[in-house]
């Protein structure tokens, strides 16, 4: 008998390699917008700006519509580029993000092999436009038992309200039978803590947990999930 009945999967950085998709999207759009070449160093600077804005979203300090545009405005400003392009660039970026699909640790085969053994759901803070395309192109939309996106629910992970809505929709079992798997301590793991469910931190880079979030399981490879459930 399985230890868990339900797995809540994060997408970006967990099931799918977000950095690969981010790099491909931004570099191709730089050319389309006539901004020249976006170097790896520039991408690194953007990624740090982006991470900080998403943390603000998780903490409820800014609205989603603000951060999506402002991150690019700040990035362009720092690189000496036209900040007025921020809104149009973001709109194109949301669509382009779904063009590059790179599975982490054969995640598609893993999810497919778990069908019928546990119920599996996507829980993501990504935008509806980007995630819908990613899930369709990756095939996860057909493998999952359901998809929950914060933009549609009106709450962001790690808010307890996000998980309350998910639990209501899936007719959740006892909370000790639910596991959330994700790469973000501040979103997935902290959210799992607030929701009262067990957590699995996907930490392939062996980062240090200095957030205070309680991790029940820590894995370097997604295939280790088989031993946990």
Image (cartoon, grey):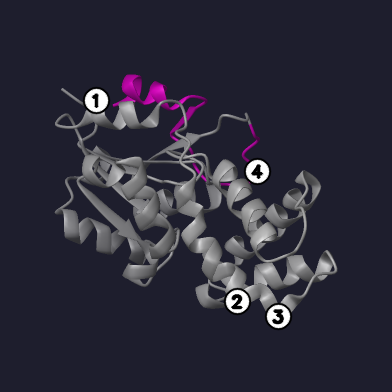
Nearest the eye: 199 or 221: 221
* Circle 2 or circle 4, nearest the eye: 2
* Circle 1 or circle 3, nearest the eye: 3
Q: Earlier in the sequence, mark 1 or mark 3?
A: 3
**Residue 102 seen in the current view:** yes
Label ID, residue 113: 1
Label ID, residue 56: none
Question: Are discs 1 and 3 less than 8 Å apart at CB?
Answer: no
Counting other residues with Cα less than 10 Å from the Cα at mark 3, is it few (<14), some (14-19), or many (20 or more)? few
Q: Which residues are magenta?
A: 207-229
Indicate the quadrant containing the N terminus: top left, top right, bottom left or bottom right.
top left
Which type of secondary structure does the marked residue at label 1 adopt?
helix
The x, y position of residue 94, in whole percent, is: 50, 62
Q: In the rendered image, which residue does mark 4 sit on?
A: 210
Q: Earlier in the sequence, mark 4 or mark 1?
A: 1
Nearest the eye: 80 or 147: 80
Q: Earlier in the sequence, mark 1 or mark 2?
A: 2
Label ID, residue 84: 3
Name the residue located 26 percent from the left edge and 58 percent from the top edge: 166
Distance from the alpha carbon under mark 4 to that under mark 3: 37 Å
Q: On the picture, is 6 further left or further right than 208?
A: left
Label ID, residue 87: 2
Counting other residues with Cα less than 10 Å from the Cα at mark 2, is it few (<14), some (14-19), or many (20 or more)? some
The x, y position of residue 187, in whole percent, is: 49, 53
């Amino acid at each position: 008998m399985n230890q868990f009945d339900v797995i809540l999967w994060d997408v970006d950085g967990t099931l799918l390699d977000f950095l690969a998709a981010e790099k491909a999207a931004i570099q191709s759009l730089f050319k389309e917008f006539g901004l020249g070449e976006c170097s790896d160093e520039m991408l690194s600077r953007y990624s740090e700006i982006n991470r900080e804005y998403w943390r603000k979203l998780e903490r409820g300090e800014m609205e989603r519509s603000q951060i999506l545009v402002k991150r690019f405005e700040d990035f362009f400003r720092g690189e000496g580029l036209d900040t007025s392009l921020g809104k149009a660039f973001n709109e194109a970026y949301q669509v382009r993000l779904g063009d590059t699909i790179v599975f982490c640790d054969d995640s598609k085969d893993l999810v497919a092999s778990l069908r019928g053994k546990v119920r599996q759901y996507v829980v993501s803070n990504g935008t509806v436009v980007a995630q819908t395309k990613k899930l369709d192109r990756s095939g996860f939309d057909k493998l999952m038992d359901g998809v929950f996106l914060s933009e549609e629910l009106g709450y962001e992970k790690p808010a307890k309200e996000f998980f309350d809505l998910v639990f209501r929709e899936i007719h959740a079992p006892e909370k000790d039978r639910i596991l959330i798997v994700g790469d973000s301590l501040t979103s997935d793991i902290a959210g799992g803590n607030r929701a009262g469910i067990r957590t699995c931190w996907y930490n392939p880079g062996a980062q240090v947990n200095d957030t205070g979030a309680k991790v029940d399981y820590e894995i370097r490879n997604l295939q280790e999930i088989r031993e946990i459930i």
